[in-house]
Image (cartoon, helix red, strand yellow):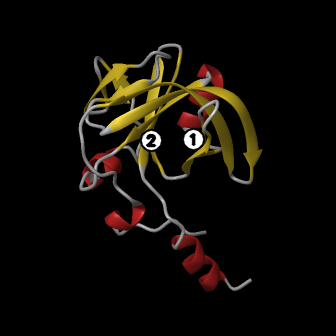
Amino acid sequence: MEDEAKGIALNQLGYGLYVIGSRAGDEHNGMTANWVTQISFDPPLVAIAIQNDSKTKELIQRGKVFSINIISAGEKALLTRFIKHQRKVGNKLGEDEIEMGETGAPILKAALSFVECRIVSQARHGDHTMFIGEVVNAGVHREGNPIHLEDTGWSYGG
C-alpha cells in the first residue's frame, strides 16, 4: 500500500469535529474527537473511537457514560482548547461553561447541541477503543451549522 495514497484517501472521508465529555465519580474531562457516527435508529446508538492512552478513554471505561457536544462552524478555537486535557473546575471544563447531563457527563453550554450516552459495548481495535453508546438524552442550545474537519485546515488521515 502506498502511504501517500492511503493518507489522501483517508483524508477524503467526511469527518465532523466534536468535544467528547466524560466523567467517573467526581472526575471530568473533555477532548476533541472526530470519529463519531450514528449506527442505529432503534434503539438510538452512536459509536465513538477514543485513543487508548487518553484520560477520556479511562473515564469513559470507569464511568460508563459520555457526551458528544456538536460544535458550531467557526469555533476552531473552542476545539483547540480541548486538544489538551480539560478538568472540571466549578461550573467549567477548562475555561468553558458546562452543565451536568442526565448521566453526569459534562455538556458544553457553547455547543450547538449534544447527545448523552450510556455505554452498551466497547472493543479495542488498534490504537483506539470503540465505544457504542445508547442515546439517553439530547438537546439543542442554538441553531447553526456544525464544524467539519476540512473547515479547520487540519487533517487526520493515517
Local SS, label 1: loop
Q: Nearer the viewer, residue 22 or 38?
A: 38
Residue 16 position (above or below residue 114)? below
Instruction: Judge the density around disc 1: few (<14), some (14-19), many (≥20) Cα neighbours within 10 Å.
Output: few
Left or right of 48, for residue 123:
right
Residue plotted at (45% across, 15% down): 102
**Position of the N terminus by quadrant:** bottom right
Residue 52 position (above or below residue 59)? below
**Position of the C terminus by quadrant:** bottom right
Mark 1 or mark 2, which has the lower sequence index? Answer: 2
Residue plotted at (62% across, 23% down): 64
Left or right of 70, for residue 143:
left
**Residue 96 pos. (x, y %):** 26, 33
Local SS, label 2: strand
**Residue 77 pos. (x, y %):** 26, 51
Q: Nearer the viewer, residue 149 or 54?
A: 149
**Residue 66 pos. (x, y %):** 53, 29
Query: What amino acid is found at the position of numbered circle 2 in the picture?
Result: Met
Query: What amino acid is found at the position of numbered circle 1 in the picture?
Result: Ser
Q: Quadrant of residue 131?
A: top right
**Residue 38 pos. (x, y %):** 57, 44
Residue plotted at (57% across, 41% down): 54
Q: Nearer the viewer, residue 37 or 18?
A: 37
Residue that carries the numbered disc 2 in the rendered image = 31
Residue that carries the numbered disc 1 in the rendered image = 54
Q: Label 2 near label 1: C-beta < 8 Å? A: yes
Residue 59 position (above or below residue 26)? below
Left or right of 142, for residue 50:
right
Residue plotted at (37% across, 24% down): 88
Instruction: Judge the density around disc 2: few (<14), some (14-19), many (≥20) Cα neighbours within 10 Å.
Output: many
Q: Disc 1 vs disc 2: which is toward the camera? A: 2
